Amino acid sequence: MAQTDSIETILKEKRTFAPPETFSKQAHLNNLEEYEILWEQSQKDPVSFWEKAADEIHWFKRWDKPFVWNEPHAQWFVGAKTNAAYNCLDRHLKNGRGNKLALIWEGEDGQIVQWTYQELHQRVCRLANGLESKLQLKAGDTAAIYMPLVPEAVVVMLACARIGVVHSVIFAGFSSPSVRDRVLDAECKAVFTSDIGYRRGQVLELKKTIDEAVAGLSCVKHTVVLQRRSKTKMVGRDVDYDDLCENQPSSHAAKELDAEHPLYFLYTSGTTGKPKGIVHTTGGYLVGVTKTAKLIFDLKDKDVFWCTADIGWVTGHSYVVYGILSNGMTSVIYEGALNYPHPGRIWEIIDRHQVSIIYTAPTAIRSFMRSGDEHPQKYKLDSLRLLGTVGEPINPEAWMWYYNLVGKGRCPIVDTWWQTETGSILISPLPGVTALKPGSATRPFFGIVAEVVNEKGQACAPNEGGYLVIKHPWPAMLRTIHRDPDRFKQQYWSRFKGMYFTGDGAHMDENGYFWIKGRIDDVINVSGHRLGTMEIESALVSHPSVAEAAVVGRPDTLKGQGIVAFVIPRETAGTDGIEELGNVLKSHVVKEIGSLARPDEILFTKALPKTRSGKIMRRLLKDIAAGKEVSGDTTTLENPGLLDIIKPN
Ligand code: WTA
């Protein structure tokens, strides 16, 4: 349960930044009065707004009903037929964008690949044909994608979408047990991988991880391998990616799919030990990401758009692939670390490819800030016209740095709030009309009815902290949790009647601007990546030396939150090797989940503070982890001695 002190805030940030005139002039939306009218209408009648937005994509057959609601189950564009890959590719060939660049890829070693819409279309068609004819994949099958950020990964996503295979992209930093859980939960028939990936000059052996992950899983019929290093002979269920595409026709009739046909599953952390498979659909999702991308990023035909997220996260799905390609934009992808091999790598890439819109995470901005102003100053950055952030609250200091050092005061910043579950951005400035306040995601998008409510579900007063909820369904929202509809209902729709519960704390100021504070549940946000504390706890207790574990987040100036684990070792562990055990356990978590879940600190203790009903008092642990005085009521503690930390000898 949330603590009021963590969501109550005092509004300190008073600066506002009107849209620069040069930007406003050319923006899709630049008339504040018109915007207000449209916004008010969309609040009263979200369905009409979205129905109109739906005209911007291609439908093989139009819908019978725009929206059907059986709480908590929404359906959008019922009876309509469409295809996500068709909208991202074929539509643009028909509109004369065939020779326009769809993808610009840069490898960490500087290698560059550029594909036009026509080339991307051909590659997607060849693979789609191969998947159907050689692997007998068909609409409704599921496939996992465990690949580095290479252009072929985008081809695989679109080829699946083209034939109606539901893809589940698994971030290539997850370790084999995590991959295995996800492949099994989705009963994937095929798994796409690559022999290796590159990061910070290191080679990642992805195929090895996949082999471990799928060993003995009978649902997996094929492992498709993109061989980047060298060609080796494929054995067993392995299939070479190039062989699969070879001699396949470069055209393919995209499958006409129901609007509600699932486009993908994406596993994300929640409040239990098991990640949940968020289900997104084809039609509503595509309408949501297409419309938000166009207006929030003010997309124009000449833009070069770079979202630095990996396709393993929802940001990569919505604003590297689907929302960007459906708008016919040029999308930049980069396989590697943004500050490797030198701290200015990100700025160098912007100049080289003349990026006009950059979309990145606050944690990355803070790390660039830390490495020094001289790095962005060495580059021109004059191609930029708009900056975006996502993933966590941005602190005003980082916001100002981004605005001045990167945008040179010329580029608006769109601080976009959304979630894996929401599919598309829900709260964000519209850069041609919205006056910005550093640290605020400003106002809900058209058709998004957001509110901050108290424990009872009543609207909070301005500046009063509470829970962020969405009061009307929207097209790109998740439809369910794969194989767990009860959890879907429980998690999002049972807290407040008729409202989607986001799990975030927030307040709204006197101008109707939203200030998002972050998670109020047991989910922590490390460098913009969501991790469930329970997930890490399960990993820790799976080690034979651990009797009990409790994991909490603590504020971290770089990563947003850091991970602190309180561990009760088994008797046998003794105190002698306690420091070493700490390191062993850190590696164990990396082995079980992946390096993104590595605890920053492990504190060994003989007992954990618990309530009389046996619930761990996380609030106390959070205070201790943050080095704060333990605050609040401790009278309900079973063991008021608090923590008995075991110090290394
Ligand atoms: C947080 C990422 C403040 C929030 C798209 C949310 C943010 C979680 C912002 C979702 C923002 C995301 N300001 N907080 N602009 N954007 N968050 O599912 O806590 O990886 O619930 O989706 O990130 O993370 P997820």
Image (cartoon, rainbow, N blue to C red):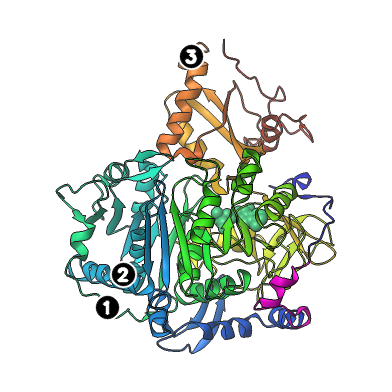
Residue 638 place in picture, x, y as percent: 68, 29
Q: In the rendered view, would you say 101 is above or below 526? A: below
- Neighbours of disc 3 within 10 Å: few (<14), some (14-19), many (20+): few
Work out whether residue 595 can be spotted.
yes
223 relative position to 356: left or right: left
Q: Are marks 2 and 1 in contact (CB under 8 Å)?
A: yes
Q: Which mark is residue 124?
A: 2
Q: Which mark is residue 252?
A: 1
- Neighbours of disc 1 within 10 Å: few (<14), some (14-19), many (20+): some
Q: Are marks 3 and 1 in contact (CB under 8 Å)?
A: no
Name the one closer to the observer, 63 or 572. 63
Q: Are marks 3 and 2 in contact (CB under 8 Å)?
A: no
Mark 3 or mark 2, which is nearer to you? Answer: 2
Q: CA distance from mark 2 to mark 1?
A: 9 Å
Q: Which mark is residue 577?
A: 3
Total numbered labels: 3
Amino acid found under the numbered disc labelled 3: Gly
Mark 3 or mark 1, which is nearer to you? Answer: 1
